[in-house]
């Protein structure tokens, strides 16, 4: 009987995987190195350390900062009112504790772990391919297509710049994009790949051993716990596929599939206490409950989903058709059910639909390699086989180039764009944040423009009135209050004693003036800045000036 330990991978194979994985990780370093080098050559602006999705990137740094301060319970640092913490985002809190012990900054810790988990992800992808195939060619095909395969989003965006397919907008959906975005996406994909590797072994015909420490049972349980802590939604498709798989085995055998039930329970059992805890927190903690309610990540339109995965789907069609016709137990059943559950979940009535795209590429590439090995390589002559595969890669890779290049060339090389999107801040704001970090009161509330408020919890010990569309609670109400204050429409609400928080620090600089003067629809506000000009002297305890930025310390 085969176990995970008996999957043979030669030393030469591992060398190839390690070299390719190292190169892929190194590619994600280059844009950051360029951005930092550009930052060193100017004194006008500060690069904030994130090139992909700065809004979420800032929250990751804020979570690491919480861990650096010794917390093991997560609080919304972009929310001004005090609230109870919860056992969420433990991964980033742990990184904060590690950063404190190692005397590393949160940003350095973030990127070091991002590189480490990305490397681990690529190794895990090859392990999954090696579990399925004995020969080296299909193993490498699976690795290459899953590691760097993307879609035709690059072609769509040429015709409609506002139409972003998943390969240009959903980092968790594609491993290479995930490795550029953050540490927990590649870590989650690695866990899914290893879980799939284990199940493809133990569900093979003739395997009857019960779960144990030696044969991977404990490994599945621990990996599911890790996923439940860092990305619980990633468990939903594979757990749902196991439910269907057990049901299918029961229907085929007309008996209770005890072997499959025992092994599936290794994944299901750890999920239950986490699900109960999450429900309790969202039900009884009003701030966390509202955070969960406004945390909506809908799936892209179906035609954009096809653009993102369509080319891989086309290659996978022969493998999918064969799997439906024969519905073989060795791999095809589980992977087909996984793919079906995953796609169906993307459009289920669920506020985190898009998060279910994590791992979708694994069963899809599985069938793509099946299609290549069993059909396409026989229909394409040996003379044209290699050029055809190269052409396939050429079509799949451009989106990866764009996700590396767009934030760099569009923002860092164009400071005005970078300042608008929040990738950069004016250097004076950075100096003001340094003062706030060193001299400010911990947990005090800061009022600033949204782009600045986004980064304050990431680099200081303070919280903000509004800084994030999901992690500020209630987001819409707080944003309107900030807008009305800076635009001179309501100078009293945010400075009154009726709110469940008290503004201690007030920023006034270029970002606030721009934010106050005109909105995204082009409307102008003649009273912009009136509330700043009319601040009562007795309310101001101190004024801290950093170039064009003034920080008012309020009584």
Image: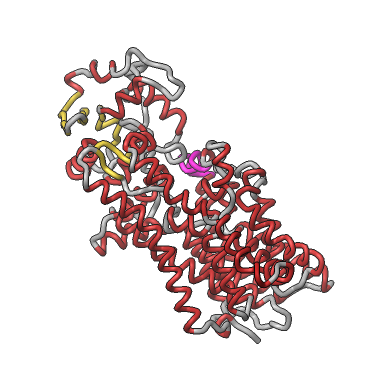
- Residue 555 located within the stretch drawn in magenta: no
Residue 204 falls left or right of residue 218:
right
Numbered marks: total: 0
99 relative position to 219: left or right: left
| Residue 114 position (above or below residue 424) | below
- Quick check: 281 left or right of 356? left
Q: Tell me where the magenta segment starts and ends, as one range.
A: 283-292
Q: Residue furthest front?
A: 383
Asked which colour scheme the image uses, the reply is: secondary structure
Q: Nearer the viewer, residue 321 or 429?
A: 321
Which quadrant of the rendered structure holds the N terminus?
Answer: bottom right
Whether residue 320 can be seen here: yes
Left or right of 148: which side holds 531? left
Instruction: Pick the residue in front: 336 or 191.
Output: 336
* Residue 287 counted in the magenta span: yes
Depicted 236 relative to depicted 544: above or below: below
Q: Vertical placement of 38 versus 465: above or below?
A: below
Extreme bottom residue here? 1
Query: Residue 369: where, in percent of width, then height?
Result: 65, 68
Residue 159 in the image: state x and y as whole percent: 58, 38
- Residue shown at the point (34%, 20%) measured from the top left: 517
Q: Position of residue 386 (x, y in %)?
A: 61, 68
Q: Residue 407 lies in what quarter of the image?
A: top left
Q: Nearer the viewer, residue 1 or 236?
A: 1
Magenta segment, prevailing SS (helix, strand or loop): helix
Q: Residue at x 60, y 47 (%)?
A: 353
Quarter where residue 422 is shown: top left
Q: Residue at x 46, y 49 (%)?
A: 403
The answer to whether one can see residue 275 in this image is: no
Residue 321, position as x, y percentages in the image: 77, 62
Query: In the image, what residue occupies the spot 39% across and 56% down?
Result: 92
């Amino acid at each position: 009987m085969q176990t995970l330990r008996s999957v043979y991978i030669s030393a030469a194979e591992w060398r190839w995987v390690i070299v390719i994985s190292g190169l892929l990780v190194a590619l994600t370093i280059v844009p950051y190195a360029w951005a930092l080098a550009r930052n060193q050559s100017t004194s006008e602006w500060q690069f904030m350390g994130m090139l992909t999705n700065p809004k979420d990137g800032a929250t990751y740094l804020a979570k690491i900062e919480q861990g650096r301060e010794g917390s093991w319970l997560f609080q919304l640092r972009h929310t001004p009112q005090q609230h109870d913490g919860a056992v969420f985002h433990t991964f980033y809190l742990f990184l904060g504790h590690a950063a404190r012990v190692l005397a590393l900054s949160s940003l350095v810790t973030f990127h070091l772990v991002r590189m480490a988990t990305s490397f681990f992800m690529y190794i895990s992808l090859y392990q999954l391919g090696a579990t399925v195939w004995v020969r080296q060619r299909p193993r490498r095909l699976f690795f290459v297509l899953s590691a760097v395969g993307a879609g035709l989003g690059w072609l769509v965006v040429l015709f409609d710049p506002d139409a972003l397919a998943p390969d240009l907008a959903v980092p968790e959906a594609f491993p290479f994009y995930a490795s550029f975005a953050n540490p927990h996406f590649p870590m989650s994909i690695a866990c899914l790949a290893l879980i799939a590797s284990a199940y493809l072994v133990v569900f093979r015909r003739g395997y009857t051993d019960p779960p144990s420490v030696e044969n991977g049972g404990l490994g599945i349980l621990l990996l599911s716990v890790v996923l439940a802590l860092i990305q619980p939604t990633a468990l939903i498709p594979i757990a749902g596929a196991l439910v269907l798989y057990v049901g299918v085995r029961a229907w085929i055998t007309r008996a209770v599939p005890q072997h499959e039930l025992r092994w599936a329970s290794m994944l299901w059992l750890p999920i239950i206490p986490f699900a109960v805890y999450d429900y309790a927190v969202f039900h009884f903690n009003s701030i966390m409950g509202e955070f969960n309610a406004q945390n909506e990540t809908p799936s892209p339109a179906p035609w954009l989903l096809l653009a993102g995965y369509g080319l891989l789907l086309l290659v996978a069609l022969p493998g999918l058709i064969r799997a439906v016709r024969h519905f073989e137990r060795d791999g095809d059943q589980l992977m087909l059910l996984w793919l079906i559950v995953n796609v169906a979940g993307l459009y289920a009535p669920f506020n985190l639909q898009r998060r279910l795209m994590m791992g979708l590429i694994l069963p899809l590439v599985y069938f793509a390699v099946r299609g290549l090995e069993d059909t396409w390589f026989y229909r394409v002559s040996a003379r044209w086989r290699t050029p055809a595969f190269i052409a396939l890669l050429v079509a799949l890779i451009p989106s990866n180039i764009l996700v590396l290049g767009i934030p760099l060339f569009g923002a860092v090389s164009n400071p005005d764009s970078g300042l608008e999107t929040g990738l950069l801040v004016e250097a004076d704001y950075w100096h003001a944040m340094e003062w706030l970090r060193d001299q400010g009161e911990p947990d005090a509330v800061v009022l600033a423009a949204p782009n600045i408020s986004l980064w304050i919890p990431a680099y200081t010990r303070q919280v903000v009135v509004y800084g994030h569309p999901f992690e500020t609670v209630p987001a819409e109400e707080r944003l309107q209050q900030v807008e009305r204050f800076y635009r001179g429409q309501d100078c009293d609400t945010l400075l009154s004693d009726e709110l469940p928080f008290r503004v201690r620090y007030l920023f006034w600089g270029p970002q606030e003036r721009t934010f106050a003067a005109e909105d995204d629809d082009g409307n102008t506000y003649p009273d912009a800045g009136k509330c700043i000009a009319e601040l009562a002297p007795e309310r101001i305890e101190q004024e801290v000036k950093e170039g064009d930025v003034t920080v008012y310390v309020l009584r």
